[in-house]
């Protein structure tokens, strides 16, 4: 079941000079699995909507986070201008690229 809501930005975290994470306040219970993604809309225009990976863990409650490289696109420039307490429209979860329940511990490394 998809969760559509207007979410308040709690925190913006600069990861590098051109990569930022946006932490959004959501209901206390997160209804997504690792590997799923969300849609973020910053306005009515199709250029202001993107599908982005969720970069927070489903075990972290009360917020959902996505991380985006800031480019020269209209979406990135608008996103980069937002401040804490601003609101964005989100819908999640999307995607089936998730691990099934297992007792095995699995780690992934990427570069």
Image: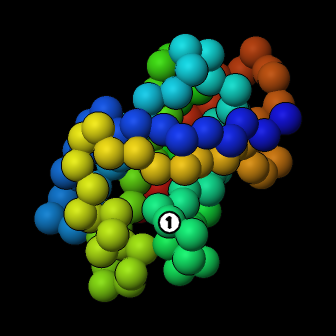
Of 82 and 52, nearer the camera is 82
71 lies above or below 99: below
- Image spot of residue 102 (x, y percent): 80, 21
The residue singled out by tag 1 in the image is 43
Instruction: State the residue at coordinates (31%, 33%).
Output: 10
Q: How is the image coloured?
A: rainbow
Q: In which quadrant of the rendered view does residue 12 lie?
A: top left
Query: Picture coordinates of residue 62 (x, y %)?
Result: 48, 19
Q: Residues within 10 Å of mark 1 (few under 14, many from 20)?
A: few
**At x 32% / y 45%, what residue is drawn?**
86
Image quarter hosting the N terminus: top right
Image: 95 above or below 4: below
Q: Nearer the viewer, residue 86 or 52?
A: 86
Q: Please name whichever residue, 4 or 72, is drawn nearer the observer in this view of the structure.
A: 4
Q: Residue at x 54, y 56 (%)?
A: 40
Which residue corresponds to the image point at 34% horizontal and 63% vertical from the top-left?
Answer: 79
From this view, report whether residue 37 is shown above or below residue 106: below
- Give the tally of numbered discs: 1
Does the rendering let one see residue 59? no
Q: Residue furthest bottom?
A: 72
Secondary element at image label 1: loop
Residue 80 screen position, x and y as percent: 26, 64
Q: Is residue 67 above or below residue 72?
A: above
Which x, y percent locates residue 17? 14, 65
Residue found farthest to the front: 44
Task: Pick the quarter of the image with the C terminus.
Answer: bottom left
**Residue 81 can be seen in this image:** yes
């Amino acid at each position: 079941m998809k969760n559509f809501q207007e979410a308040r930005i709690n925190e913006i975290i600069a990861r590098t000079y051109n990569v930022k994470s946006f932490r959004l306040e959501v209901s206390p219970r997160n209804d997504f699995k690792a590997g799923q993604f969300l849609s973020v809309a910053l306005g009515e225009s199709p250029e202001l909507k993107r599908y982005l990976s969720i970069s927070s863990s489903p075990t972290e409650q009360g917020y959902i986070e996505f991380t985006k490289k800031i480019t020269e696109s209209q979406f990135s420039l608008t996103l980069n201008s937002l401040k804490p307490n601003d609101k964005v429209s989100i819908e999640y979860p999307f995607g089936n690229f998730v691990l099934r329940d297992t007792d095995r511990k699995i780690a992934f490394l990427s570069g």
